[in-house]
Image (spheres, rainbow, N blue to C red):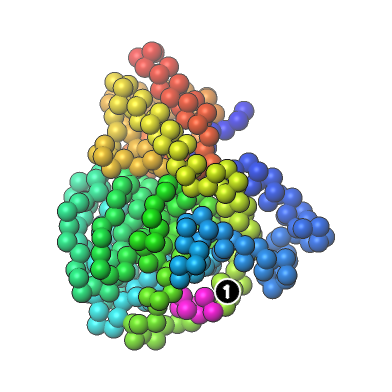
Amino acid sequence: MKKHNYSAGPCILPQEVFEKSAQAILDFNGSGLSILEISHRSKDFIAVMDEARALVLELLGLTGKGYQALFLSSGASMEFLMVPYNLMKENGKAAYLDTGTWANNAIKEAKLFGQTEVVASSKDANYNFIPKDYTILADADYFHCTSNNTIFGTQMKSFPKTGIPMVCDMSSDIFSRVLDFSQFDLIYAGAQKNMGPAGTTLVVVKEEILGHTGRTIPSILDYQKHIKADSMYNTPPVFPVYASLLTLQWIKNNGGIAAMEKINNAKAELLYNEIDRNPLFRGTAQVEDRSAMNATFLLNDESKAAEFDQMWKAAGISGIAGHRSVGGYRASMYNALPLESVQVLVEVMRAFEQKA
């Protein structure tokens, strides 16, 4: 049976990416070698890295605007410390918006480097909304926010105007919606949501903001070192970068980010309408802050959980169990999840209502 994959990450990827990746594992570019064994210094892989970095900037509308794209050998959690290492001055300070678990983890790392001010937080409400109307310190070295909160199902719908560099963790909604990406000075994202398999992290940085901290930065953590080496300061994660390139090509060939946003909005509208209509369910995030990527919802009667679980599993649905911090259910609707999969979940919810 076809599986409808709602996993929060590693997550669903386009079928053609699986097929092309599988072929490359057997024979990459007719070389007689697997993508898993080729040299990262080979002509073929250098071409992969160059195209992937260029395509990132093209899709984000940042080509020729002073930005560099990097594929690094770490999860997004490594960026929690690389950002302050590269942007927070000695005896400086940073401003952070606390909207979820990963934002909170980033704050903990930044505090190791200097004064870290939390401008607003929704922690007391179990992160079920995005704080608004906060003031960002004008003398901070940078402002950090998290665009989408995978665990709690919230998403920033707008971003503040700042006179300081703005950093955004876009791990779970990169390439999913149209934004003015030039408003951000540094974007980072783990690949395993909307871009590729786990194993690489994308960093997009405006080069002019680097090199002003007065810090001595370990080479492997220095963005400038990675830029100078064309994202190959050390051996890169070859296969995840290749699979990410295939996904970026798929996005471009299917209409780019604007097309992704259109279908993502349709998926989110379909599911949230059912959550709100069906008397057996309720959403956990405040309506105005609901994520188009991760819909979190609960049963109104938890005693019926076993019956509902049996029904969605029988329909071939996978990965909708909620995170322990919220409970209930979480339907992750990343770019590659088809609208038909959301329709299957909605039909199960309706059938469950009829049985109640």
Residue 161's spot in the image, x, y percent?
25, 60
- Say which quadrant the C terminus sits in: top left
- Per the image, the residue denoted by label 1 is 230
* Front position in the image: 138 or 348: 138
> Compared to 183, does 195 lie above or below?
above
Q: Residue at x 57, y 49 (%)?
A: 252
The main secondary structure of the magenta stretch is helix
Residue 17's spot in the image, x, y percent?
64, 47
From which residue to which does the magenta span run?
Answer: 220-228
Q: Residue at x 29, y 83 (%)?
A: 90
- Say which quadrant the N terminus sits in: top right
Q: Is residue 347 left or right of residue 300?
A: right
Q: Is residue 209 left or right of residue 317?
A: left
Is 353 in the magenta? no
> Compared to 203, does 250 lie above or below?
above
* Front position in the image: 271 or 204: 204
Residue 168's spot in the image, x, y percent?
36, 60
Circle 1: is it few (<14), some (14-19), or many (20+) Cα within 10 Å?
some
Residue 283's spot in the image, x, y percent?
29, 33
Q: Is residue 74 left or right of residue 31?
A: left
Is 221 in the magenta? yes
Q: Could you tell me the amino acid type at mark 1?
A: Asp
